Amino acid sequence: MSTPIPVIDVSALASDQAADRRAVASRIGAACRDIGFFAITGHGVPLELVQGTFTASQAFFAQPLADKQALAYASLSHNRGYVGTGVEALDEHRGADQKEAFNLIWTDEATRPPNAWPALPGWRERVQAYFDATLAAARRLHRAFALDLGLAEDFFDDKIDRPLATLRLLHYPGSAVAQAGQEDDGIGAGAHTDYGNVTLLATDGVSGLQVQGRGRDEWIAVPPLPGAFVCNIGDCLMRWTNDVYLSTPHRVLRPARERYSIALFLDPNPDALVSALPSCVPPGQAPRHAPITTQAYLQSRFDATYGSKAG
Ligand SMILES: O=C(O)CCC(=O)C(=O)O
Ligand SMILES: [Fe+2]
């Protein structure tokens, strides 16, 4: 199946030749200005680590509900912990999402609390290694964004060094209705845009993710791309670029077979000021959005998604 989502080999971002880095950056930038989604290969995260993290995710969700609820999101702070099936509604108009999730955060364990870990042998080491590796890949993408936006290559470095980053393991139960070949009008994850700067998504080979370009009607299915991460721009970076980069609505349909995915959300440091980049504001025009800190912006988004139901 062909896909309008470009697949970009980003290995040259590690090159010591500036021209090579620039060439990749402009391919990434073109995707960010158009569909807001692209897939990356050559990202430096070993396939065994990705596969091992899917195995860890399956082991987590296979636990008895009481063990998962012991780490409940509602009992913790700072966007950590387990969210049960039917609790979130990413699209408030469509009802609850048929998925369960487990969140870990970036933490220095001083200014932010430690993560809550399940008591599964070797689990923490493996999943933390995946978090570290995907975060490094997401930071390298920010160097490409900076090059493409005409900024110093390290412009974002000190704005994402204490990030509000979240690693989210996701599990969508299989739908008996979809399995019987009928359309299941339930939703795995309601249509939404992501909140932060960039998301790196690994999927397990079961399709379900769909993307709707801004101003376009149709939903485009994102095929599973083994070994690649699906990347998308979030609302913070869209705002920062004065809407030059696009954060694009996407959703997950209820899959016939159960589906696992793993999302790394890189949202900037809480005190990073998201203020229109001068290179993105046409001469003589005012920026489209007022400056806001990442913390204030994200809080308003989480409040809307969870309402009073988190648990
Ligand atoms: O599971 C997926 O494929 C996408 C999940 C997603 O969009 C999200 O959690 O923000
Ligand atoms: Fe998303």
Image: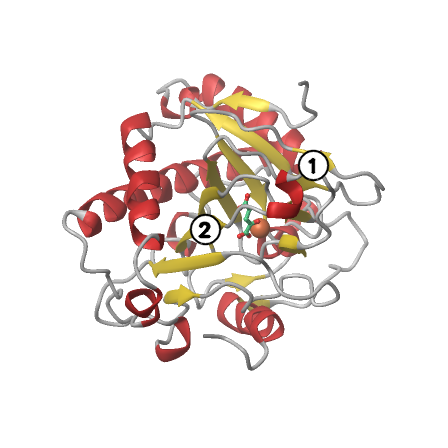
Q: Position of residue 203 (x, y in %)?
A: 48, 36
Q: Amino acid at mark 1?
A: Gly
Q: In which quadrant will I find the N terminus?
A: top right
Q: Which residue is mark 1?
A: 181
Q: Position of residue 160 (x, y in %)?
A: 40, 53
Q: Could you tell me which secondary element the residue under label 2 belongs to?
A: strand
Q: Residue at x 14, y 50 (%)?
A: 121
Q: Position of residue 202 (x, y in %)?
A: 45, 37
Q: Could you tell me which secondary element the residue under label 1 belongs to?
A: loop
Q: Residue at x 63, y 61 (%)?
A: 90
Q: Within 8 Å of ligand 1, the CB of disc 2?
A: yes
| Residue 192 in view, yes or no | no
Q: Which residue is mark 2?
A: 170
Q: In which quadrant will I find the C terminus?
A: bottom left
Q: Within 8 Å of ligand 1, the CB of disc 1?
A: no
Q: Residue at x 26, y 64 (%)?
A: 115
